Structures are given as C-alpha cells and as structure tokens.
Image: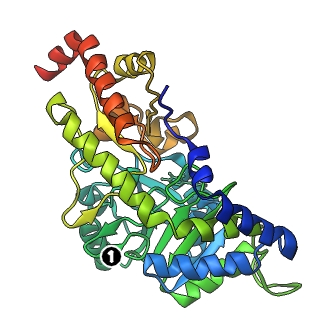
Amino acid sequence: MIPFLDLKAQYADIKPELDAAIHRVLDSGMFVLGPEVAAFETDFAAYCGGTHCVAVNSGTSALHLALLAAGIGPGDEVIAPAMTFVATVAPILYAGATPVLVDVDPKTWNIEPDAVEAAVTERTRAIIPVHLHGLPADMDPILATARRHGLTVIEDAAQAHGADYKGARVGSIGDIGCFSFYPGKNLGAYGEGGALVTNDPEIAETARVLRDWGQTAKHDHALRGFNYRMDGFQGAVLGVKLRHLDAWTEARRARAATYDARIAGFGLGTPAAPPDSRHVYHVYAIRVPDRDQVQAALQAHGVQTAIHYPLPVHLQDAYRALGRGAGTFPVAEQLGREFLSLPIYPELTESDVDACCAALAQALGAAGPVRAREAGR
Ligand SMILES: *Cc1c(COP(=O)(O)O)cnc(C)c1O
C-alpha cells in the first residue's frame, strides 16, 4: 500500500537534529513559549518576508487572533471561499462577525475575485483568501478590491508555506498571513501549532498580548485574551524543520511534475496557476467525475487517497446557515464531488508516483463507461 501520508519517513531522515532540539527543551525546562519559540518566530517571519511572527497553538487560533487584532467583531462581515476547510470560517464566528461565503473559480479552484467584489457591502471589513492545496490565490484583484473598500486582507496560508505569488511569499502579501503547523502540513509540528505573520507592529503586538491571556505585563490583563501559546517543543521542532522546508518543497514540486507528465493524457482536471506563482503542493488534487469509484479502485490497487474537501462549508450541517443549501455555490459543490487527492510528500519516491499513476490508469479504465458518459456532456 502506498500511504496517503507518511510522517515517520521524515522523522527518520532528520532524527538526530530533532532529538537534539527536543532534548534542549527538556533540559531548559522552558515548556511554553521560551527561547525556542522566539527563535522560530524570528526565522519564520524572515522566511515569509514579513517583519513580525506570532507563534500560537494552532492555525485556527492564528486566524482568530488575526481577526481580533484587525478589530473585527459583531456586526462586521468577512468574505471567505466556500471551498475550504471549516477552520477558515469558524474563527469569523468566534470573533462574533458574520462569514459571507463566495464561490471559487473553476480553473484555479481558489476564491473567485469577481465574486469577492460582488459580495462587498457597507458592513464588510475583511477578506480571507485561502491558498487552497498550496496554490496561491490570485491576490492582485483581491488586494484591489480591499484597497477600494478599505478592507483587511487575512491570508489563510495554512496549506501554503513557502508558496510565491509574483515574487512575494504568501502570508506577507495581505495585511496578515495565517499558518498552521498541524503535523501533516508542509511545515508540520509534532503536535498542534500555528502562527500569524504581519508587517504591522500594532497587529503583531495585539496578537502577542491576546495569545497570552491579554497580559501586557505579568498580572496586567489589558485585554480579554486566550491561552493560545505555542509550546516549547513545537518551537524547537519547527526551528529544525524550517531549515529543510525549501528542499522538501522542491521534492513535492518534482513529484507533482512527474504526476503532471504521467497523467497528462488521462483527461483529468488540474488547477490553473495564476501568473508568476509557485504551487507548493500541500495536496496534489485532480478532478475526476466518477470520483468515488476511482477512489475505491485506487484503494483496491494499493493507493491510499483523500479528498480536500468533499463538502463545501455551506453544506456542512454546522454551517448551513451560511448558504441557501445545494446550488448556492455550484463550482465549490462540483469540485467537492470531483476532487481526489493523490499521495504527495517529500519522501514519496518517483517510483511510488509511477505506481500511483499506473494504478490510476487502471482505476480510470475500470470506471470507463461512466467517464465516457461524463466526457460526452
Ligand atoms: C489546517 C487548516 C487550518 C487550521 O489549522 P489548525 O492548525 O488545524 O487549526 C485552517 N485553514 C486551512 C485551509 C487549513 O488547511
């Protein structure tokens, strides 16, 4: 079986460095925040091309603090794509604001800039573009809309560490960039983790205070904050792993190029990148009309796959109020029916990719009659 993800392979590759970092934390007794987290913040801000980084305990917390630090609260509307993980949208509700979902672009699979412009009202305060699967959203028209209406742009870069758009790193293109270091992400901790990156010193300071119970000094709770602190082990692990991220990204891109070449004749959908952008392939997704059959056939041929995501946010039971049921966002809904994520991680070998593509060819053959019907539409 070729697994969808293998986190043990990466640990085996850099075990001495990671073990040393973990032992530094044990020896220091600094288990929450501390020097390892501070050093990682400095390095990650520089990596993203931002001036400030505030490390927190998850990507969700980063988004929540980004919204609060931007002054967003009850009565405010925040625009986000319907096709994303629910963690893009839930923090808008945590902040007491109203999520306004919009559809995605059928070519890029990312938030549709014209739909963003059309969704702006006098209550709109922010836009959260998501760099879905590691492919940058088309930021220029989104920034233009934001400038026109005085909106804050909070990038959800949870899947896109190190991706570029027109020479800039994602996370430093809008006003605030939010990252997740959940273990399976391109830069993954050994537990939960997240961070926000910004060039705005006031936003950074507010987020820093909010993550630690709103304290401006010990016992001085200036704001109603949270316990969103990053722990020392995650800071140490992330500091080590950040030094390998570019090499891992190149490996992901090489595997993706092999997939692209092998499946070029299969008649499957892959995303169109915006001009001058660099995809970091958190996910290598294809569109396949008879997805469930193909996924089952791949499993039978020894290839584990996943779906990111089968249901857009507005069709999830908890968030149905954000849409008008099926048909509200037709592109996101269609993608949810057709998306299929193939294995991709730096340690996946070229021969693994070959095996996945051979299995895919067989799976598509097995699902042939349905495919032919769909292609003929
Ligand atoms: C993973 C993810 C998040 C949330 O990050 P956590 O660290 O799991 O809280 C938010 N948005 C997107 C698009 C994600 O993929």
**Crowdedness near tag 1: few (<14), some (14–19) or many (≥20) residues, C-alpha within 10 Å:** some
In-front residue for pair 284/275: 284
Which residue is at 52% across, 35% downward?
316
The residue singled out by tag 1 in the image is 168
Q: Can residue 231 be seen in this snapshot?
A: no
Which residue is at 23% across, 56% downward?
273
Residue 115 image position (x, y, % from top left): 27, 55
Which residue is at 52% across, 70% downward?
243
Q: Can residue 365 be seen in this snapshot?
A: yes
- Left or right of 247? Residue 277 is left
Residue 195 image position (x, y, % from top left): 59, 69
Q: Which residue lies furthest to the left in this view?
A: 376
Residue 278 image position (x, y, % from top left): 29, 62
- Left or right of 305? Residue 28 is right
- Does residue 267 sit above or below 241 in this rendering? above
Find residue 250 and report its image quarter: bottom left
Q: Quadrant of the C terminus?
A: top left
Find residue 242 and report its image quarter: bottom right
Residue 33 image position (x, y, % from top left): 75, 75
